[in-house]
Every structure is written in C-alpha cells, then in structure tokens.
Image (cartoon, rainbow, N blue to C red):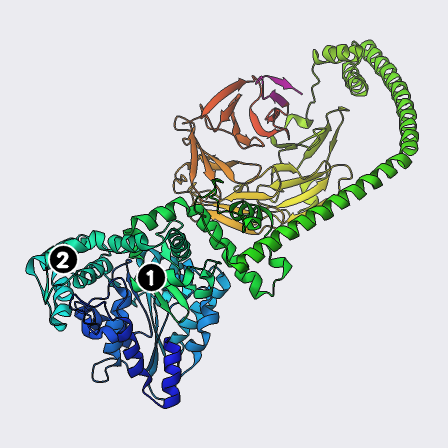
Amino acid sequence: MSLPTLLAYVRACGGDEREWEDRWHRAQTAGQPDSDGDDNVVAPYRGLARYEPADKELFFGRDYLIADVVEMVGRRRFSALIGASGAGKSSLLRAGAIPALRDASAPGPRLAAVRVLTPGERPAQTHADRLADMPDSDGDVLVVVDQFEEIFTLCHDPVERDRFVGLLLGALDEGSRLRVVIAVRADFYGRCAEHPALAAALQDANLLVGPMGAAELREAVVRPAAAAGLIVEKSLTARIIGETVQEPGGLPLMSHALLETWRRRRGRALTEAMYEAAGGIHGAVATTAEDLYQQLTPQQRETARQILLRLVTPGDGTHDTRRPVARAELETGSPDTAAVLEHLARARLLTVDDGTVDLAHEALISAWPRLRAWIDNDREQLRLHRSLSEAAAAWAGLDQDPGALLRGSRLDSAAEAFRPGDRGSPAMSAAGDPGAPEPVRLTPLEHRFLTASIALREKEVRTRHRTVRRMRFLTAGLAVLLVPAVLAAVAAVRQRTTADRARARAVAAQQTALSRQLAAQSTSLAATDPDLSALLAVQAYRTQPTREAQTAVYDAAADPLRLQLNGNKPVTGVAFSPDGRTLCWSEQSTAVRCADTMAGTVHALPATTAANKEPSRRAGTGTGSSPNVTGLVFLNDRTLLITDELGGTHTTDIITGRAQQLVPAGATPKFVAISADGRTQTLVNQPDWQTGRPIGDPAITVRDARNGHTRSVVRPPNLPTDAMAVDGDQLHIGSVMLAISTDGQLIATATGGTGHDQSTSLIRVWDTATGGLQATLRPDTAPTTAAFSPTGHELATGEGDHLRIWNLLARTSTSVSDSGLSPTAMAFTPDGSALAAAGDNGAVSLVNMDTHRNQVL
C-alpha cells in the first residue's frame, strides 16, 4: 500500500497520521532475514537509502551538526545546508534535524507542521499549495527542500524556476509563518548566485556539511548495531573508519557496505570477514548491483539498462545527477518493466514512492562500473533524449499544439538518433548494428511527439516544393512577357549612351580649345604682366589640364606671385578658408585683410570695433585703443571668426563684410588662443605690469568661443609662474598661450628666459581635459608663435628668423630657414599639406609639408 492510500484510510478512521506514517517508513526499512530466518528483524543500517524521521533511533554521529541546524532554523527564516554528494545532507535533515525541531521540550522555533519536498521538473506548479497553505494552529510551518539542485538539473524553464524561488523567499516577508531550509549540493551552490534575491538571502544563513570525523564515524558504525543487539568487531570498526575518512562523500557507500555485512551476519557479531565478503566500502554497491544484474534474463537486463539510464541526468560541466521520474515514463512497451523495478527496489538500488521512481543514491552512478560505462557510452544520446522528453511533455501540456513540435537542427538530431518509424524492427545501436542494445527506448508520448514533428516537416517540405514550382511557372511566364520590354529598354539605353558620349566629346573639345587659348594668352603676357599671366595659366589648367596649360603653369611658377601686405605691419593671425581659395591675415591693431589666392585680389574687412562698440583699455598702454586681433578661424568658406587679445569674439562675412558679435571683449587683457574649428578658446591669466607675475593662480581657462561659457579651468602642475619680468619699459613674457589644436584637446605654452636670456626655452604640450603634461620640447630660441596641424600630430613654431616643424609622436623636429621673415602668426591649410606663416615684415610664406620648402606669396 502506498503512503497516500494509507494516510487516506487513517484520516477516514480518525487515527494519528504521524504515527502511521512512521510505521509505514519502518516497514519500508525492514531488512532481509538473517541466517536464522527471522523475518521481523529490522536492519540497523539504511544502505544507499536516506534516513527518514522514523529512523531517528538509528541515526548517530551528527549531534553537533543537528544542534547547529536547529539554531540556524530558529535564527533565520530562510537558510541552506550545503555539502558534497554523499555528505549526508538528506539524512541529517530528515532523521536528525526534523525530529529535534518537532521535540517541544527542545530549544528552537515552535512548529505547527513540517513539510518535506523535492523540486522536480515543475517545482512551482507542483508545490505551490504546500508553500501557501497555512495550518490553523499556532506555530510556524517548516518547509524542508531536499535536493534543491533539481531546480537546475530537472527544471529547465527559467520562469518556473524563478517562480519557485520566489515562493520560497516568501518566508522572508513580514508576517510570514514559513521557515524554509534548502539542502543543495556544493557544486550547484554557485548557481544560486544567478538569482540575486536568493544570493542575498544566503549571505549569512548557510551551514556547510563536511565529512564526519573518526569519532563521529565510530558512533555511526557501532551504535546502530548496539541498538539492534549486535557487536561490531573492533578491527572491522577501525577498517571502516580508515576507509571512509579517505573517501569524500563516502557515507552512503559505508552504510551500504554495513548493510551487506549485516545480511551476512552469523549470530550477533559483524566481522571483518563478512565485510570483505560483501565487497567492502569500495565494492559493496558494485557487488550488489552486479549480482542482481547477472540474475536477470537478457531481456530483463536490457529493460534494467533502459530504466537506469532514464533515472540519470548527464552533467554539463558538473557531475551526473539522479533524475526522479514518474512510474508511467518507464512504461516503454517492455513486459518486464514491473518485474525489473521490483528486483531493483528490493535490492535497494531504487526507491519507488507514490508513483515516483528514483535512484537510492547518486553514489550508485559512480560506484557501479557497468552503469558508469552505460552513461559514458551514450552520454550524447542521453542529452538528446532529455531534450526530447522535455519537449514532448511541453507539447502534451499545450494540448499537442503544432507550434510546440520540433523543427530545424533539433528535429534532425532527434530523428537520426531515435528513428520512430523503426519501433517494430529489431533494436539497433546508433551505429546501426543489428542486435546491439538500444541507446534509449521512447515512451508512447515521445514516439507520438517525434512522429508528429517529422510529419509536420514533411508537410512543410511538400508545401515549399509546390510553392517553388508555382513560382517557377510564374517566373517563366513573366520572362516571356518581359523579353520584348527588356529589348526595347536596352535599345533605348544604348541610344542614350551614344548621345551622352557624343555630347561629352563636344564639351571636352570646347574645354580643350578654351584651355589652349588661355595658355596662349598666359604665355603672351608673361613678360609684361606676370601676375595676370599666372592667373590665366591657373585658369587654363582648371579648365582642362592640357599639355599647353601645364607648360604655362610651370612657367608662371618660376616667377612666384608676391602679395605685399599693407603698411608692412606685423601679422598677428592668419587663416585659410576650408576650400583653400581665401587667405586672411590680421595686422597689428584691428586690420584684417583677405586675399583671393586664385584671382590675386586683396580686400580689407571692417575694423574690429564694428563688433566691439566700446574700445577697451589695453594693458600697459593707458590708451583707449581697440585690442589687437590674436586669432582667425574660418567657420565655413565665407564666415571668419575673429578673436582679440581680451577674449572677445565676433564673426564676419568676408564677402559682404557684415559682422556679428558673439562674446564682448573683457575688461583686462589676457593671452588668447582659439582652436581651428572655432569652438574652443583658451585664456591665460593676465600679467601684472609691475611684477610680471600672473594675477591669481597660474591657470588656463578653456571656454566656448561662441558664447563665452567656461568649460573647464586647467591648472597644469608645472605651469611656470616666474617667467615674466619687467626690463625698463619692456614686458618680457616667458609663459604665454601659443597654440591650441583643431579639436581643442591640446594646448601649447612657451617658456623662455627673461629679458634677452633664451637659454632655458621650453615648449610644453598639455591635455585640456586633465591638465596632464603630454610633451616637453626644447626650441633653439623662445617661440613667438605656434600652430597645430589638423591631425594634432605636428606642431609648427616660429623661432626667430626660421620655422620649426615638431613631430609630437616621434619627438623629432625639422628646421625651415627663411631669411628676412620673423614669423608672428601661422596656420595650416585644411588638409595639412601646407603651412602659411606671416612675418613682422608683412609678408606671408607658404611651406610645403612634404618637402619643407617655402615660397613667399
């Protein structure tokens, strides 16, 4: 009689359910009769089976650990017992902790009920009622979740798993009357961290179950025998203790070896000879299993193999685990199933409880070589079968919805491995050898599921073939109709292409004639009007690069064009338009002039005061003049951004001369630089005229040139503060802002000796975001101006009467001599191929960055 049936009768008769449940468990633990034939003798050891609450009188050696569990359950509403397979977690909870917690006289929480469960494949669906139903009496309900790792090995639905964990963690809710203890195998404890709430609940609420010590093992061996009136030979006790201490997870092996020794007893003594006859701790399980296997018929052996393989889940990076299954799943059509199950259960290799079949212990997997070999040989087949079983169960749960059938590669693998159409043929292995054992027999549900999946695939293939045939017929018909249209379109395209080519040849001929005419005019004017001759040569080449145009350009280049800037005043800023056609420069004070590099014409822009309505006082002069222009940047081909030495900015249209103020000039002078993209402006603290020191902390302000908003204040740790001095009426500045990169990420400052001492000149390159020093360069003399290339990899500096090009990546430099030119402002062309340097004599020099040769414009 099953336990639920028994309890139903007890409830109907008004009996004590707990008493009759204990009686039922004691009846299940009854051992085989000894040599004297006493059928009523109960075995003092449980073998591979776990100890149940009814076995508390036979459970010894864990007193200290039982007390720890009781204390932990009383302290925490959610806790965990962690240990390796075979460490005795299940027996500790069932035969040790549960009886101790039920004892009303013992310390610990007051319990109204104790419920023991294992998760299974659908833990939330199966156990939701047991986790929600509260008894009417006072006290808490203790829920013991044994084999908690089944939520990972058997439950493959993440939603179902999360729901079950959420139900268990409900014990932590305020007002909850649940207390939960989970027993989890140590190699699955890390997977608990996949659930943050579960990991948090286990932070300080877990207890590790380690191996039993020698004294504890002695109690576990001797005291159950003494309770049964038996004596264990001292040499046997010492041998079992020595072998078990060295065997991790060896408690079920020890218990089974003792059970088999007890079966071979003679009188009251358990001897070492009996222990050896049973196979000892390392051979008792294998001996029991192998003896049973050899007693079966060939057909029964294959059935036993099929049953045992269904009870194992192959590990994926972990050890193989047992898999409890419903009794119905083992009905695969073999007439021997019931008899084989009875043999395996009687040998205590399996447990059959309430319609569920399970291995007595996972130790059987590793202790029986034959089972180990079966698993290893068919491991991939077993994984495929587990996937098929789960999919078939889901299909059945969805009322055989076609959408839940297998498809694609999963169906290909399953069909090849299990061949549902061959169920009536002789069993075949995966290799196709007749008579070889089948890897797995399919249940009727699995067979129907796989057959339906294959049938659906074949139907879809036939449908696709019909669709392809229809599409082919349709395509052929369309092709017949499209042929005339395509031929007409091809003819039209050919005619248009012919006309386009004729038109292009005519245009090219006209351009060639015009180019040659312009080149001839350029040659005729070379002696009388070289400037116009050069312009005509350039226009001839741009019209069509004929041989005559190339010759005219080369002849004009031999007599370079020179643009003399108005008044020979020092140039303070220079910029190229993005299209390279316009070059603008600023002279001392507010004059800004622009030259058309193609036409050779020069025009002046309106004075800076057009944008700055009220002139500011310049530092050190005491006059009311307008501030000098210090930076020019093209925002596009027509719009020029102009910045002055006081930090003011405005834009001017170089064609119409219309100006728009962006940021007014400041009240005090500052040293200013602006990035080539016109977005970033930097200012250095002004120097005090009397002391030559910066006013305030030495710092560089980085702001938006378009609205004046400060982005950051950079205080480089090595920014010099002692490089400014007064020499008579001359202010010598040894630390000024020289240049800023196009993207505003780098700035360069120059440091030199005061007065005429230039022996300690330095150039430092800083990161505007961090204030970190990126490079330190040593020029020949203190630089007067500098400019970054568009990439930021080169820095050009003006040093006396020559230029120097610094490679910031390689830390090398190249000097470009230019007698008669002292650079005061520089700018790279947009593509970085050339550098325009303006000098204090009013001339502009263009340096080729590939050859480092210069040409005066």
* Location of mark 2 (residue): 274
Image quarter hosting the N terminus: bottom left
State the image coordinates of residue 567 (x, y, percent, origin top left).
67, 27
Residue 768 colored in magenta in the image: no
Residue 846 colored in magenta in the image: yes
Taking depth in this image into account, of 844 and 725 the one nearest to the observer is 844
Taking depth in this image into account, of 94 and 516 the one nearest to the observer is 94
Q: Residue furthest bottom?
A: 14
Residue 362 seen in this snapshot: yes
Secondary element under disc 1, as helix, strand or loop, is helix
Q: Is residue 556 above or below residue 417?
A: above
Mark 2: few/some/many CA within 10 Å (<14, 14-19, 20+): many
Q: Is residue 494 above or below residue 1?
A: above
| Amino acid type of the residue tagged 2 in the rendering | Met
Query: What residue do we see at 82% from left, 11% from top?
Result: 525
| Image quadrant in which you'd find residue 352 | bottom left
Q: Which residues are magenta?
A: 845-857
Taking depth in this image into account, of 122 and 705 the one nearest to the observer is 122
